[in-house]
Image (cartoon, helix red, strand yellow):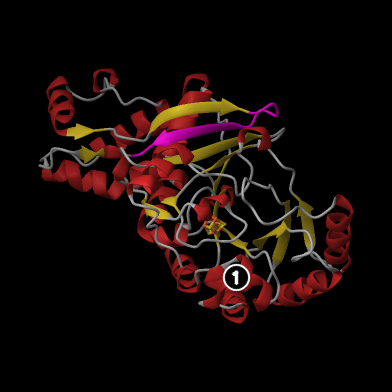
Amino acid sequence: MNPVTNFFDMNQHAMREFFTRMEEKPYRADQIMKWIYHQGITDFDKMTDISKDLRQHLAEQTTFSIPTPVSRQTSRDGTRKWLLRIDELNCIETVFIPEKDRGTLCISSQAGCPLNCSFCSTGKQGFNRNLSVSEIIGQLWLANLELGSFQQRQRLITNVVMMGMGEPLLNFDNVVMAMELMKHDLGFNLSQKRVTLSTAGIVPGIDRLAETTRVSLAVSLHAANDDTRNKLVPINRRYPLSELMAACQRYTKRRDNDTITFEYVMLDGINDSERDARQLVNILSTVPAKVNLIPFNPFPGSQYKCSSKQTIDQFRDILMQHGVITITRKTRGDDIDAACGQLVGQVIARARRLQQGHAFQQQ
Ligand code: SF4
């Protein structure tokens, strides 16, 4: 038996196989999952429906390992941010956004990000590594624990968005397994509509996602022509808009015309003209779409400014007049750098950058 088996790295199938190999009943997996994900308990002593001998054996052979909080911040608007250590060199960030009728957790999928979008703080620090399943699902478990969901037996996190640090489709297998745990009835039991994966446009990943699992899809579009998008989202050079929109069409066809959310950060003088709005209407005409307009959150060293409120309103009106459902997202948690595009995991990432002599992978 592997001495470092981590239950947070396993789905129900893997756990059942694990217990079968131990010559135990496979339903032990279901018991463990209920303790972890329904009760928030990872102390074998408290797992009273499992025999003492087995508990002792498991305590010697297995672990419940997730990222460790380094700091916690709460914004004046109630947004909470955790800086989590995943190893001695890397930290990630997780953000909880409470609203009247929902609570959304924004989860990271990679330490850093290789895609280097020019308006994104995470992209500026380069790519460190993919997160494991336990490091992804552990963010949701830990946030539930710290918010008091388990103790209060109340679902305080109703929605999860894979929109934190990293490009989730470049960590496909781990992200999909973690999302399955989010949806599983012995896991967090979230509906597929409330689990959203956001991609910058990894075309083969979108096709694979459609074949593999069912979640909500968001695409970080940010520009409606290749010239502008090449500058903002460099992966566009590899998968230009024509290929990306074709992948979105295939995705919605396979998914009974599910609506795709297109994220569009509003950058003054860059992508916010009337012409940009009309181009956006045009390219979205082929897919069931809604648009989130995101006022840009400047960060130190960023080269962009946010569009004015008037420009954002005009942009939104053009989309709405053409039948595109459009919401302007409120900026949340900007006083603690928890707003969209501001996640950096800066403490340890900076230390690592110094160690590596700034030799980060860049595209
Ligand atoms: S916007 Fe997303 S995909 Fe682009 S660099 Fe930032 S984290 Fe990566």
Mark 1, other Cα within 10 Å: few <14 / some 14–19 / many ≥20: some
Residue 237 falls left or right of residue 305: left
Q: Which residue is mark 1?
A: 252
Q: Which residues are magenta?
A: 75-86
- Count of numbered marks: 1
Residue 27 x, y percent position in the rendering: 25, 39
Name the residue rendered at 52%, 54% in the picture: 124
Name the residue rendered at 75%, 71% in the picture: 280
Closer to us: 259 or 170: 170
Closer to us: 224 or 23: 224
**In which quadrant is the N terminus drawn?**
top left
Residue 274 falls left or right of residue 163: right
Q: Secondary structure at mark 1?
A: helix
Residue 25 x, y percent position in the rendering: 18, 39
Beta carbon at label 1 within 8 Å of ligand 1:
no
Q: Amino acid at mark 1?
A: Thr
Q: Is residue 6 visible?
A: yes
Query: Which quadrant of the picture is home to ligand 1?
Result: bottom right
